[in-house]
Amino acid sequence: MCTIYLILATTRLEAYLLFSLSDTKSFDLVEIV
């Protein structure tokens, strides 16, 4: 369970980074997640 939680946290961090990089790509990520 800890591993899954870590993976989820990493994915959220990556999405946040992409969000700050470009708005359009971040919107797509939010829709997928």
Image (cartoon, rainbow, N blue to C red):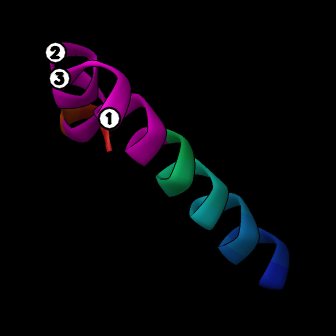
Q: In the picture shown, does residue 6 fall above or below 13?
A: below
For disc 2, the marked residue is 24
Q: Which mark is drawn over residue 29?
A: none
Taking the image as shown, residue 33 lies to the left or right of residue 23, namely right
Quadrant holding the N terminus: bottom right
Residue 21 lies in quadrant: top left
Taking the image as shown, residue 26 lies to the left or right of residue 3, namely left
- Marks 3,2: beta carbons within 8 A: yes
C-alpha gap between disc 1 and disc 3: 7 Å
Instruction: Tell me where residue 7 appears, x and y as whole percent.
Output: 71, 59
Residue at the far right in the pictured view? 3
Mark 2 burial class by Cα count in 10 Å: few <14, some 14-19, many 20+: few
Residue at the far bottom in the pictured view? 2
Which residue is at a point 83% across and 72% down the rendered structure image? 3
Q: Is residue 32 magenta?
A: no
Instruction: Tell me where residue 32 appears, x and y as whole percent.
Output: 29, 33
Q: Secondary structure at mark 2?
A: helix
Q: Which mark is drawn over residue 23?
A: 3
Mark 1 burial class by Cα count in 10 Å: few <14, some 14-19, many 20+: few
Which residue is at a point 46% across and 39% down the rendered structure image? 17
C-alpha gap between disc 2 and disc 1: 10 Å
In the rendered structure, which segment of residues is drawn in magenta? 15-30
Which residue is at a point 27% across and 18% down the rendered structure image? 22
The kind of residue tagged 1 is Ser
Q: Which mark is drawn over residue 20?
A: 1
Q: Is residue 24 magenta?
A: yes
Quadrant holding the C terminus: top left
Q: Magenta part mainly helix, strand or loop?
A: helix
The kind of residue tagged 2 is Thr
Mark 3 burial class by Cα count in 10 Å: few <14, some 14-19, many 20+: few
Q: Nearer the viewer, residue 22 or 9?
A: 22
Residue 18 lies in quadrant: top left
